[in-house]
Amino acid sequence: MNLYEQYENSKTEGIDDKIKIITNLITEYPKIADYLYNRIDTCFGKHIVYVVHMKVDGIDMIKIGYTKNSVTGRFSEKRWTDHHKIEIVEVLRENTLQAKGAVDFEKQLKSVCSIFTIESNLKLPGKNEFMNIENLNEILTHYDTLYPKYQNIIGLKSPN
């Protein structure tokens, strides 16, 4: 059975068979290691949890989130700029955590700050995650209080 057939068969097999086929694929096609490493970085590497003061179509808002890339790079992506004029006024917080810590921290921060969420008709990712600029101090206080609790959390997060 060739490597491709082994791969196809391994999809319904156990974890040991999957590990074996991944090892064989890396040995046969070493370039795939770069692609796998990128995916591993998404699930296990560093991520930034941020609070940003931004203007969307001229309206001041706060956005909480996480990204594997830079905060400014995150908001220059086409999916953000297709329908709205996005301007980062100031990156107020951006701390780096391991992937699981970042996801857990962002989830908890959004949960405690959900009362500050604004209603909008925006057509962009995270459209329901924008918060009222008037609650900036409370949002930053929650961020600063919660952040230390997530600094030592290590684990896997699901790929985006």
Image (tube, rainbow, N blue to C red):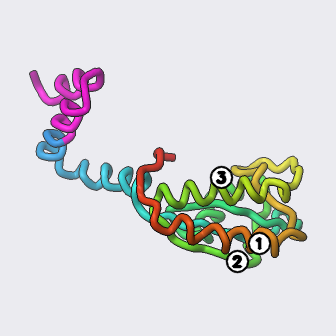
Residue to which mark 3 is pinned = 79
| Circle nearer the viewer, 2 or 3 | 2
The structure residue drawn at horizontal position 38% and vertical position 50%, both measured from the top left corner, is 39
Magenta stretch: dominant secondary structure: helix
Where residue 67 appears, as percent x and y from the top left, is: 56, 61
* Distance from the alpha carbon under mark 2 to that under mark 1: 7 Å
Residue type marked 1: His
Q: State which tag comes first along the sequence, 2 or 1.
A: 1
**Label 2: few (<14), some or many (≥20) within 10 Å?**
few
Whole-percent x, y for residue 73 in the image: 58, 67
- Pointer 2 or 3: first along the chain: 3
Give the mark toward the camera: 1 or 3.
1
Taking the spot 65% from the left edge, 60% from the top edge, the residue there is: 65
Q: Is residue 113 above or below residue 24?
A: below
Residue on which disc 1 sits? 53
Residue at mark 1 to residue at mark 3: CA–CA distance? 19 Å
Magenta stretch: give its range. Answer: 1-22
Q: Secondary structure at mark 1?
A: strand
When asked about the image quadrant of residue 46, the answer is: bottom left
Instruction: Describe the element under mark 2 as helix, strand or loop.
Output: strand
Task: Name the amino acid, label 3.
Answer: Arg
Local packing at callout 1 (Cα closer than 10 Å; few below 14, some 14-19, many 20+) is: many
Residue 15: in magenta span: yes
* Magenta stretch encompasses residue 113: no
**156 up-or-down from 141: above or below:** above
The image quadrant of residue 54 is bottom right
- Is the C-beta separation of discs 2 and 1 under 8 Å? yes
